[in-house]
Amino acid sequence: MTDDAQSAFIDIPGVRNFRDAGGVGALRRGVLFRSGSLHTLTPEGALRLKALGLRTVIDLRSSTEIAAFPDLRHDLDHETLSLPTLPANREDTACPWPEDQAELYPFMAATAGPSLVAAIRRLGAPGTLSAVVHCAVGKDRTGLTIAVVQSLLGASEADITADYLLSNTGLGLLDGPTPYIDETGAERISRPVSAELLTSSFTWIHDHHGTVPAYLRAHGATDAELDALRANLAA
């Protein structure tokens, strides 16, 4: 890992895979962070988040995940916005989450439009920053959300992908899959991310909408909102 990539990681005790999303494209550092959930945040970790000026937490997890593993605050003064990336994952839904990672990424692109637009609106609003976007471990749902934001800030595909792949380092996945306990108490497998996974999400977006801005406009975003995001986050 390069020194520049290493510098993206910030030690927040009790939070996995915490790093600065800035320094990619025109996205400036110190305003938008990404991580795993805050459900094991320690008091020391909370003090470090306070030092970062935390104002907003965007939680991409499902209501079931949040109920099982609620974020801890330790008296932090911030607003939390719940924006599930994926539909409720129940057996009787029309769109249960794919178990296969390769199927998950196009599925996320197909279902995440409303969540992405809501996140972009919030990140473009005055007084939102600094903000943390997180899911369970900050890898897949967070990976796509941050990649879309970085793309709107003019980042190249290569730079977006390189930043996305840092989750393998942040989660100890460089040597392959590792087990974890999900919100139901079941043991599951956390798998490394790859460039091909993120590419498949963007391929779905391009095939169905042409461009990322067009995809977001199809889900209700306005040009003014996209411009506000850029103005709020750009260096």
Image (cartoon, rainbow, N blue to C red):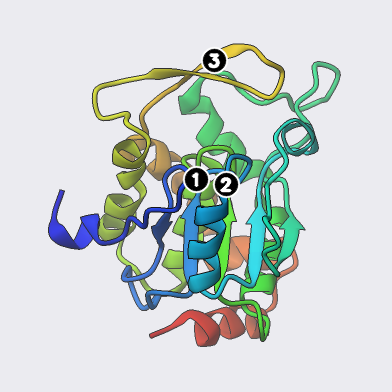
Residue pictured at 83% horizontal, 24% vertical: 93
Secondary element at image label 3 = strand
- For residue 6, above or below residue 165: below
Residue pictured at 70% horizontal, 68% vertical: 78
Q: Is residue 8 left or right of residue 138?
A: left
Please name whichever residue, 138 or 210, is drawn nearer the observer in this view of the structure. 138
**Label 3 sits on what residue type?**
Arg
Whether pointer 2 and pointer 3 mark residues with C-beta atoms closer than 8 Å, the reply is no
User: Which one is earlier in the sequence, the residue at label 3 or at label 1?
Assistant: 1
Please name whichever residue, 105 or 28, is drawn nearer the observer in this view of the structure. 28
**Dot 2: within a 10 Å radius of its alpha carbon, few (fewer than 14), some, or many (20 or more) residues?**
some
Q: Is residue 64 left or right of residue 189?
A: right
User: Which one is earlier in the sequence, the residue at label 2 or at label 1?
Assistant: 1
**Dot 1: within a 10 Å radius of its alpha carbon, few (fewer than 14), some, or many (20 or more) residues?**
many
- Disc 3 and disc 1: Cα gap in Å? 19 Å
Q: Is residue 154 left or right of residue 105?
A: left
- For residue 171, above or below residue 101: below
Whether pointer 2 and pointer 1 mark residues with C-beta atoms closer than 8 Å, the reply is yes
* Residue occupied by mark 3: 188
* Residue occupied by mark 2: 41
**Label 1 sits on what residue type?**
Val
Estimate the x, y position of residue 154 in percent, counting from the top left: 38, 74
Q: Nearer the viewer, mark 3 or mark 1?
A: 1
- Disc 2 and disc 3: Cα gap in Å? 22 Å
Whether pointer 3 and pointer 1 mark residues with C-beta atoms closer than 8 Å, the reply is no
* Residue occupied by mark 1: 15
